[in-house]
Amino acid sequence: MHSIFDQKAVDDFVARIETLKPDTRAKWGKMDAAQMLAHNSLIFESARNDTYPTMNPILRWIVSRMIRSMVIGDKPYMKKARTAPAWAVSDPKDLEKEKTRMRENLQAVHDLGAGHFEGKSNPTFGTLTSAEWSRLFLKHLDYHLEQFGA
């Protein structure tokens, strides 16, 4: 997998995002393309700003122990994996605004650089390396872009 701290990877993901159209349909799941981008932006913004949604402590413990390796590891996500309720987006979103927001989030995380994320704590997964943060961001975004054939 590429690194989010490599500009080419950011540019490649932006190009994929640009292929999304209002009528692009998901291969699985309930979100439309705009909601999916908003969902991904939440992940990026939470990490950048240390503003994470509240999660049930029991669910957080289960997630941290049971799926940490799936989320941060090298193996791809399982298709049709459920979104934690705290991260779900169900209200209508404007696709062009969400494309812009996602592009800005990708670039902002890239610009912060690996040093900013090295040893940064995640409330669910604990302290992560910059490589683990990069995998978390890009693996999650890749999964959802694949969901929409992008």
Image (tube, grey):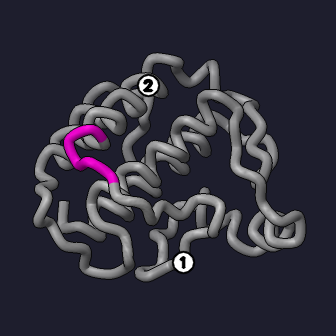
Relative to the observer, which residue lies in front, 9 or 58? Answer: 58
Q: Name the residue under label 2.
A: 110
Q: Which amino acid does label 1 sit on?
A: Arg
Measuring 59% from the left and 41% from the top, which residue is drawn there? 133
| Residue 65 in the image: above or below residue 119 | below
Query: Mark 1: which secondary structure?
Result: loop
Q: Residue 34 appears in which quarter of the rendering?
A: bottom left
Look at the image and give the residue range highlighted in magenta: 93-97
The residue depicted at 19 percent of the width and 59 percent of the height is 150
Q: Is residue 147 magenta?
A: no
Mark 2 nearby-residue class (10 Å; few <14, some 14–19, many ≥20): some
Pair 2/1: label in front: 1
Look at the picture and state if 79 lies above or below 150: below
Percent from the top left, x then y, of residue 4?
42, 35
Name which of mark 2 and mark 1 comes first in the sequence: 1
* Residue carrying label 1: 82
Q: Residue 93 carries which label?
A: none
Magenta stretch, main secondary structure class: helix
Q: In which quarter of the image is residue 51?
A: top right
Percent of width and height locating residue 80: 43, 82
